[in-house]
Image: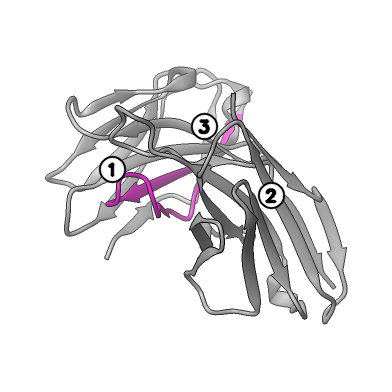
Amino acid sequence: SQTIHQWPATLVQPVGSPLSLECTVEGTSNPNLYWYRQAAGRGLQLLFYSVGIGQISSEVPQNLSASRPQDRQFILSSKKLLLSDSGFYLCAWSILLAGDALETQYFGPGTRLLVL
Amino acid sequence: AQSVTQLDSQVPVFEEAPVELRCNYSSSVSVYLFWYVQYPNQGLQLLLKYLSGSTLVKGINGFEAEFNKSQTSFHLRKPSVHISDTAEYFCAVSDTGGFKTIFGAGTRLFVKA
């Protein structure tokens, strides 16, 4: 079965410091991968998605970036964090299985980031 | 462009009472619709999804949703809620078969004893 891991679970960082959040998926190949941010009291905002190694699409211009160095690894980074980067970051994966007409996204446990 | 509106940010309800969480969407093409649940400090779990066919979709944990094309709605219902149903619920829409899904702002369901 497929599993998705995110770490760390919680992170407190000062403003201006760098960021690296990691997401890995097990049990599937060539998944679509996604990074979302969930701010307090708001819905999910799609930040980045990737359809393959090295292929990253950005949905929202910001000081964050994403990379996919391996098929099942997705990394969210920042060179200098802002206060507004605080939130709950969720990684997700999806794949279109043979015989299915619909992809379902499966979410990781999330990383709570607090920028002070 | 697609959008999703969840009409209630919070819904308090007593245990064993019925509940309806409302969702309206807008899209210029055929859509796929989802409901997800998020328990505190966890990721999202899929409750149910609508692709085509019967407009009444049954999901996990006793939840069901009805697709209404004329009203562009996909409301989530449960006839009798439990304390354990306390969570945040997200409606979502995709016009690309589940890839690049747009999520609503969420509805926080509080079930009281």
Q: Residue at left 12%, top 45%?
A: B70
Q: Residues within 10 Å of mark 3 (few under 14, many from 20)?
A: some
Q: The residue under label 3 is which amino acid type?
A: Val
The correct choice, above or below, for B109 with respect to A13 in the image is above
- The chain holding disc 1 is B
Which residue is disc 2 drawn over?
A23
Rounded to the nearest angstrom, the CA distance separating label 1 from label 3 is 29 Å
Which residue is disc 1 drawn over?
B32
- The chain holding disc 3 is B
Instruction: Pinpoint residue B81: horizontal percent, then vertical percent.
Output: 51, 22
Q: Nearer the viewer, residue B19 or A70?
A: A70
Rounded to the nearest angstrom, the CA distance separating label 2 from label 3 is 36 Å
**Front tag of 2 and 1:** 2
SS state under label 2:
strand
The quadrant in which the C terminus of chain A is found is bottom right
Magenta-colored span: B90-111
- The chain holding disc 2 is A
Which residue is disc 3 drawn over?
B13
Asked whether residue B94 is drawn in magenta, I would say: yes
**Front tag of 2 and 3:** 2
**Front tag of 1 and 3:** 1
The quadrant in which the N terminus of chain A is found is top right
Q: Residue at left 68%, top 56%?
A: A88
Asked whether residue A40 is drawn in magenta, I would say: no
Find out whether the residues at labels 2 and 3 contact each other: C-beta distance under 8 Å. Answer: no
Q: Decide if residue A45 is on the left or right side of residue A18.
A: left
Instruction: Pinpoint residue B40: horizontal percent, then vertical percent.
Output: 68, 40
Q: Residues within 10 Å of mark 2 (few under 14, many from 20)?
A: many
SS state under label 3:
strand
SS state under label 1:
strand
Q: The residue under label 1 is which amino acid type?
A: Tyr
